[in-house]
Image: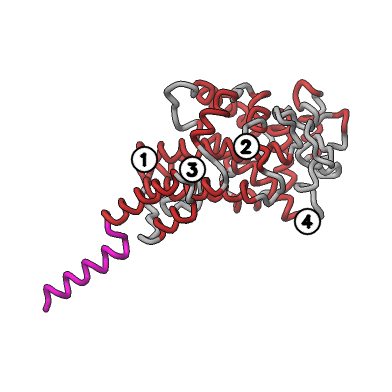
Amino acid sequence: MRKLLIWTFILLLSSCGGDPEEVTNAIDEANFLLTDRNCAEARAALDAVGYQANNARYIGVYASTFACEANYSTVNFFADDLTNLNSAAGGFFSSLAGFSTSDLMTSATDPDFLKLQEAIDTILYSGGNTSSSSFSRSQVFGTSDSTNLNVQALYMILVNFGRWLRYHGNASATGVKGGGTNPEANNCLFTYNTSGPNYALVLDALNDGTAQSGTCNSTNAPFVGTDDISTADAATNKTRLCRGIVLFNNFIDIILNITFTGTNTGELNNLAATFETLCDDIAAFGAGLCALRDMTSCEATAIENLEVYSAWLFERNFK
């Protein structure tokens, strides 16, 4: 009887964590379903064995089920977009806005954007982490597995950030800010508060003319941004601005902690030094702004500080 109780207890423990063979089979089944873009079915196969928060392979495939629903494809990213990536500070954002799927975002709440964000968040906050950093993921998954997850997240971040820039920046098909067909005809991402406490810093960022801030410069003051980030609701404005800030800050964190090898990845290595320097510049105006890697901490930051980040980093480098 005692042996039977012990064996029953062991079975209960294994069922709570998911039998390793069953988990492996579920991952394989999900990968197979994803090849035919059966996105929901793939996630259902993974859900059937219980969420494996500390299994890097499971996490990567689970993220892919959301990316599948968001019309994201790593194969297409390499084939259609990576070769067009511009690693220069003044060309990087425009190259993202010109990605092949950047036009899929047609509203601030577009499912293609939000679903891909779910995929990204699945990786960023994996392993029980409530805040995102490459270091915290390495502590849970080890160097090799965390690097694989980071690279997967990085590619999706580039695509989703490109969608955010294209839509909110009213960019053209080639990624030129303000060159799109949005009826608002906005040339800036955000409508900056002319009476805000940091407006002088914003002016300093945008008054350098087209060489620095593209279409968002002193010639079109008072710097009118998209209505989707400049609504009557302050909380909504923060959330939508923070979506771009958090995406980009996680990009910076990842790009500084991995090295790319292989064809078509040279431009990615060049980006690390470029944007580490830009974040150092931002730190002079607001310490910790480039460390805002989750929505909670970003939304807890004063809007006037987020405006400084947006003006100095986004507007000056998105042309």
Residue at the farthest bottom position: 1
Vertical relation: 206 (above or below) 7:
above
Of the pair 222 and 181, the residue shown nearer to us: 181
Mark 1 / mark 3, whichever is N-terminal: 3
Question: How crowded is the residue under tag 3: few (<14 C-alpha within 10 Å), some, or many (20+)?
Answer: many
The residue where tag 3 is placed is 133
Classified by dominant secondary structure, the portion drawn in magenta counts as helix
Query: Magenta segment range?
Result: 1-19
- Location of the N terminus by quadrant is bottom left
Return the residue at label 4. 233
Write down the residue under mark 2: 101
Q: Quadrant of residue 174?
A: top right
Please tell me whether mark 3 or mark 2 is closer to you in this view.
2
Q: Are marks 2 and 1 in contact (CB under 8 Å)?
A: no
Numbered disc 4: secondary structure = loop
Q: Considering the numbered disc 1 on the image, is that residue within a helix, a strand or a loop?
A: helix
Q: Nearer the viewer, mark 4 or mark 2?
A: 2
